Image (cartoon, rainbow, N blue to C red):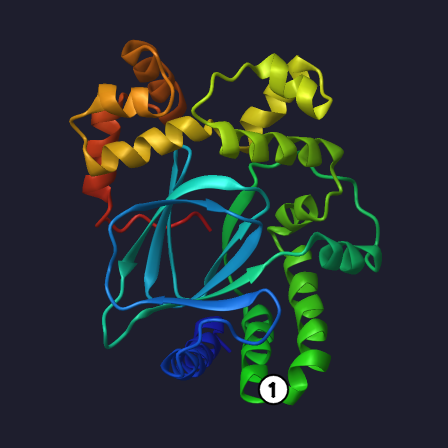
Amino acid sequence: MDPMSFMQPVLARMSAIARRQLDSGAQMTGIPRFEITHSTKPTEPFSFVFEPVCCLILQGAKRVIIGDRALRYGAGDYFLGSLELPALAQIVEASPEEPYLALNLSLDPSVIATVLFKLPSEQTPALAQGFSVGCSDPDLIDTWYRMLRTMDRPLEIPVLAPLIESELLFRMLNGPHGAVLRQVAGTDRRLSQIRRSLTWIRENYARPIRVEQLAERVGMSGTVFHRHFKAVCATIRLHEARRHLLKDSGDIAGAAFAVGYESASQFTREYARLFGEPPRRDIRRLILESSGEDMHPS
C-alpha cells in the first residue's frame, strides 16, 4: 500500500478529533505535556523559543526559520527540537474551513532516557544542530492516532497514554532523526552544558556577552564551548533583531541598539555572517519567500 494512501484518511480522522476537542473550548488534551494548536488564518511571522518538543502537523502548513535555515512543512510532517532554540515561525496555510492543526508533545528527558535504556547501546552521534524536520511513516502516524484517540476515552489516558508515548519515542529514536531525541535525553554532557548557557542568554540577551565568560559559567574551555555552541544555534540577540526587522525593515540601527549592539556596522557584519547576507537583503528575501513553496529536505 502506498504510504500516503494510508496516511491521508488517518490524518483526516485525527483532524476531526482535534477539531472536536477545540470546539469544546480546550487546547490541553488531558494527556500530560500533549496539546493541540490551531489557527483559522495565515499569520505574520512571529518570534518564539522552541522548548524541547515534537510537533506533528495534521492540517495546513507552517514555515519556521532557525538561523540560516527556512523550513516549510505540512500535513504528516513533524518537527523535532532538542534545545531552547530561537526561531521565527509563520502559519502559511490555514482557513476557517480547513484550519491549521498540529499536535505538540513536550519532550521529557527522563521518559526518553527510560526508552533508551531498553535499546541496544549506540555510539553517541556527533552533536547535531538541535532540530530536524521529517516525514512521518504509517507506523508513526498510527501511533500518534492512537494517542489522540485516548482523548475520547478519558479512562484510558492514565494507563495507555504513557505506553503510547513510549512507543512514539521508540519509533522516532529508531528513525532518521533519532539523534535529536538522544540529545534531549542528555546523553551528551556537552549538550547539557550548552543548554545551561542558552538559558542564561535567553534571560540576558541585551547584556554584553563574552564567550569566555559563558564557557566558564558552564564549565567548558572557551575553544570547545565556542565550537559546539555554534554547532547548535546562533546568537539569540541576532534572532531578536531579525524579528524587529520583519516588523520594520527600515530601522536597522534601531534593531541593532534594541538588542544590545553599540555599533550598527558591527551588527550588520555579524548579521551577515550568521544569516548569509546583510539585514535589508535578508529581510526582503524572507518576506518574498514567505509565500513560496520551498519544502523541507527529505
Q: Is residue 241 visible?
A: yes
241 w.r.t. 123: above or below: above
Q: Is residue 208 left or right of residue 286?
A: right
Q: Is residue 122 above or below residue 198?
A: below
Taking depth in this image into account, of 42 and 138 the one nearest to the observer is: 42
Which amino acid type is shown beneath numbered disc 1?
Pro
Q: Residue 51's spot in the image, x, y percent?
A: 54, 48
Looking at the image, is 15 positioned above or below residue 48? below
Residue 187 x, y percent position in the rendering: 76, 42
Q: How many marks?
A: 1
Q: Residue at x 36, y 82 (%)?
A: 23
Q: Is 81 or 38 nearer to us in this picture?
A: 38
Front in this rendered view, residue 105 or 247: 247
The secondary element bearing badge 1 is classed as: helix
Q: Residue at x 58, y 16 (%)?
A: 211
**Percent coordinates x, y for residue 142 in the rendering:** 57, 76
**Label 1 CA crowd tier, 10 Å (few <14, some 14–19, many 20+):** some
Choose top left, top right, bottom left or bottom right for residue 86.
top left
Viewer-proximal residue among 189 and 175: 189
**Within the image, what quadrant is residue 26 found in?**
bottom left
Residue under pointer 1: 154
Residue occupying the point 36% across, 27% down: 275
